[in-house]
Image (tube, rainbow, N blue to C red):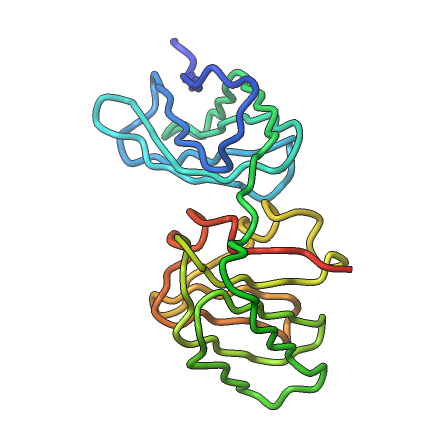
């Protein structure tokens, strides 16, 4: 009996791109089976995919700074597990600093902000500084990417890197949400998590 297999096609190596499209192939795995991609053998997947009719799979992921050791896992219909080859990326991102065309408007959210706390509208190139206990906050009229983009500054004690911030982005009702803790979240009105992930220069970390 042929054992089920799964492989990752990406070559890996040094990169300055936070986002990667991971692809691969399976054998002996039924179409529709789920593939989970893990980084450094952590228990939470960094990406999920579905096996296509031709045995292929694909998923978008966001790398962490430094070394990333990626492994794909899946299971056949009879429960036999399959683990792929390991692909390693070394992320050394080059992030564009915010534009200095105009002095930034700093909107510091108080530590005990009411819930929900709404910020906006505002002018381009605004800097929003959040503490670890800023409550539930909604940013309206956020200027994403491009010249004079806005910047969200988050506590470094909560996030180890900008990549970790991007990992934690999720959508609620089609809008990006950043969770600092169970009682503190930031919603960016009218902008999805995928759109924010594509603009890492819109984030900073502060001590």
Q: Residue reaching furthest bottom?
A: 114
Q: Is residue 111 left or right of residue 28?
A: right
Q: Quadrant of residue 154?
A: bottom right
In percent of width and height, residue 21 lies at 39, 31
Residue 147 versus residue 94 in the image, above or below? below
Residue at 34 percent across and 34 percent down: it is 33
Residue 24 versus residue 135 in the image, above or below? above
Q: Quadrant of residue 27?
A: top left
Q: How many marks?
A: 0
Quadrant of the frame with the N terminus = top left
Residue at 43 percent across and 63 percent down: it is 176
Q: Is residue 60 left or right of residue 182?
A: left
Residue at 54 percent across and 79 percent down: it is 137
Q: Is residue 48 left or right of residue 178?
A: left
88 and 109: which is toward the camera: 109
In percent of width and height, residue 3 lies at 43, 13
């Amino acid at each position: 009996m042929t054992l089920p297999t799964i492989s990752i096609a990406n070559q890996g190596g040094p990169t300055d791109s936070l986002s990667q499209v991971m692809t691969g192939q399976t054998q002996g795995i039924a179409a529709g089976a789920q593939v989970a991609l893990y980084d450094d053998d952590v228990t939470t997947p960094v990406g999920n995919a579905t096996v296509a009719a031709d045995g292929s799979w694909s998923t978008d992921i966001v790398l962490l700074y430094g070394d990333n050791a990626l492994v794909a896992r899946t299971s056949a219909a009879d429960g036999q597990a399959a683990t792929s080859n390991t692909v390693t990326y070394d992320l050394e991102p080059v992030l564009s600093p915010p534009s200095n065309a105009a002095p930034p408007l700093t909107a510091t959210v108080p530590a005990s902000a009411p819930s929900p706390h709404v910020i906006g509208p505002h002018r381009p190139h605004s800097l929003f500084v959040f503490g670890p206990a800023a409550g539930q906050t909604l940013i309206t009229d956020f200027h994403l990417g491009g010249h004079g983009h806005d910047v969200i500054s988050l506590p470094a004690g909560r996030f180890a890197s900008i990549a970790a911030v991007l990992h934690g982005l999720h959508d609620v009702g089609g809008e990006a949400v950043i969770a600092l803790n169970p009682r503190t979240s930031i919603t960016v009105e009218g902008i999805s998590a995928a759109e924010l992930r594509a603009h890492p220069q819109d984030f900073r970390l502060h001590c």
